[in-house]
Amino acid sequence: MEPSSLATVSADPGTGPTPVDLLRRLRARGAGDPVTHVERVPARAGVPAPWPTWAPAELRTAFARRGVVAPWQHQAEAANLAYDGGHVVVATGTASGKSLAYQLPALATLLADPRATVLYLAPTKALAADQLRAVAALELEGVRPACYDGDTPRAEREWIRRHSRFVLTNPDMLHHGILPGHAQWSGFLRRLAYVVIDECHTYRGVFGSHVAHVLRRLRRQCARFGATPVFVLASATSGDPATAAGRLTGLPVTAVTEDASPRGGVTFALWEPPLLPPDSGAASSFPPPQPTGGHDETADLVQVRRSALRETADLLADTVAEGVRTLAFVRSRKGAEVVAANARRALDDAVPGLGDRVAAYRGGYLREERRELERALLHGDLLGLASTNALELGVDLIGLDAVLICGYPGTRASLWQQAGRAGRSGQEALAVLVARDDPLDTYLVHHPEAIFGAPVEATVLDPANPYVLAPQLACAAVEAPLTPADLALFGDGAKEAVDELVAAGALRQRPTGWYWRHRERPEVDLRGEGGAPVCVVEASTGRLLGTVDGGSSHFLLHAGAVYLHQGVSYVVDELDLADGCALVHVEEPDWSTHARDVTDLSVVSVRSYVDAGPVGMFLGEVDVTSQVVSYQRRRIATGEVIDTRPLDLPTRELRTVAVWFTLSPQSLAAAGVQAADVPGALHAAEHAAIGLLPLMATCDRWDIGGLSTAVHPDTEAPTVFVYDGHPGGAGFAERAYGTASAWLRATRDAIAECGCETGCPSCVQSPKCGNGNNPLSKPDAIRVLDVVLANLPA
Ligand SMILES: [Zn+2]
Ligand SMILES: [Zn+2]
């Protein structure tokens, strides 16, 4: 690519091109127009409200000093509800000032009652640190706000417990530290007036279900000390936030959703990278799928479109060259590093040194590195940043001129939150969604109504998941014996879970309740089955580069994996699962690595089913066994597969919830699917169905797994399974079952509308396929889905 107007590079945000001009220049770069749709999101004027009469002058003056002259309507409405003692969730857009909605009642109460306390929970330490700065900057007498998390020095902890009246922490610390130490916290909990739960939409799936019970444990301890705090929650825009917040807290919650803050207009473009010309190296090696036969490396993923990462890197380089302050959201940490590295290279090729104004950012970075990057972007030393969604979580970066979203982030709620980073108040900004070659992305850039005309998704969590409920009840029992009244607090399934804990010897029933029998506390990780994070350590120096969550470590940190950190490439020497660390050395090979796993599945029980003649649709429990068995090395430049190398990693077992459908062999034959093509037809339908499920539920394809077979021993029929990738399920398969006909209709359309001939990653190929995307039959997948849709009731 050739960045233009390099001479005009400027960090001065006032001089950049308008979004419309910028977009026109970007789309004129290559042959053909990659833009499939442009949506104009209009600017909105703010609606201010008077300060609540109960807000003391001292507090109003403090806010005024920070530039807040009056609250917006939604802030005042939520604050009034909370001050009157109602539980409230404020669910409005990015940068709409949700924090004022809880700071106002919480701080007014702290000023009015010198004994009252406030507990603030954020999903990340970085966000809590941000909020601490905001509250501390108000300089209110006697509030003494303090963060209490894993980074808090031991020496300060006792002071905080005794003297801070505004404690900022995270659910993990509440679970591991504060609740087990409730005796030391009794003074604080006894006087607890407000519990603030920030970014509460992040508590979804299994993690959300755990947090729901941690909050019930908190309420139980408060009740023992005679306190009944008011819960104030802040959420990104989401569908039905009152219900989600109610499930999370177990309390009736009122929602405030009318955003009254001002917003600049956004020009929102949908961008589909071009198909590579058929004579290019990559496309010419693209083989037709093999209808039968075993594992064939050549049938693996070969790009037929330009990759979204490369397209985003070029767009980032182009916007930076235009002097436009740009944030690129990339879904994976690896992807963010690749985008930053490619953009830097492109800029340096044009003007040596210009690449320094682009950097990568992701959650696993150490605190100092994160802070430095945030500072540099705010001050304009950096113009371009490629980030994972770590930045989505409230780190205070606003006022960007352009946001590039590399790949649909999985939910409309996330999409809007990321796009919401663009635009200072009153100023126009550009947002671009760059489609990956993935069935969902392809569907969306050709169905803009599914983005711009649809409500955002509801946050799904399931506190009744027995794999969450039982360990949480065990934790609660350690904190204080469980009573029959507690069972109502913990909700559906609590009695059964307690009975099982008694049968397993973990609890003992006595007249006064159920008691924990062991000396040690149960080990419960809120962040799901992932286990403890794995540390990435440079072998020669012992330097800690960052961390990777346990669940991803088999995929990302196996021996031989290429691991990128801050644009520097490392190769893993050894993954030590026992010690939870991976040793790496600096090396920059010209290939990337891609781990593969194999999966086995058996049906445990059927929860619900639809008998639709030749078609059956089922929801039930399944056992899944999977193992990362090998990895491929692929040339970065062409995507060409160099080789596949075996790995020796332990298997992982999963009891979870699946949705599956069966078809009779006769119905397939009648639809024209040859017996030999049934495996490829089902496999292709399975891939696309997994790819489209995020349209229905707040999950992404990495939360879900699948398996298809021409005859499964448990169903004795051709079957496609789609399962939750979390123990006990996270509600995704259930949602798929509930929306089956809409889900499979979108799947069928996505395959049929894809411009490729024999199947590509935009329709039926999957980047995480354990079978090398073989066999796959695109036309037969459409026939399979037509049979299902013709028989299934709408
Ligand atoms: Zn295709
Ligand atoms: Zn597959």
Image (tube, helix red, strand yellow):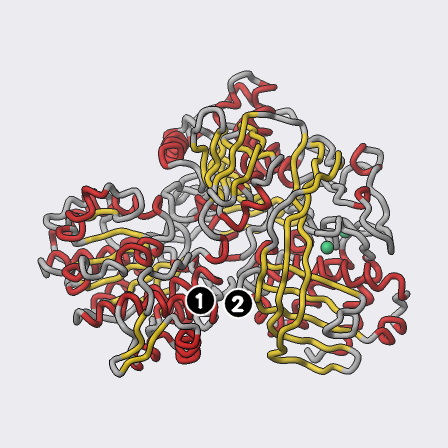
Can you say which quadrant of the picture contains the C terminus? bottom right
At 20% from the left and 47% from the top, the residue drawn is: 157
Q: Residue furthest top?
A: 352
Judged from the image, the secondary structure of the residue bearing numbered disc 2 is loop
Q: Residue 392 carries which label?
A: none
Q: Where is residue 340 in the image (x, y as percent from the top left)?
A: 54, 32
Q: Position of residue 494 (x, y in %)?
A: 40, 77
Q: Where is residue 772 in the image (x, y as percent from the top left)?
A: 75, 48
Q: Give the Cα distance between marks 2 and 1.
A: 8 Å
Position of residue 176 in the picture relative to residue 298 (left or right)? left
Q: Position of residue 743 (x, y in %)?
A: 66, 67
Reply above or below: 128 against 599: above
Bin the neighbour count of mark 1 within 10 Å (Cα to Cα): few under 14, some 14-19, many 20 and up: many
Residue bearing the label numbered 1 = 468
Q: Which of marks 2 and 1 is nearer the N terminus?
A: 1
Can you say which quadrant of the picture contains the N terminus? top right
Reply above or below: 486 against 67: below
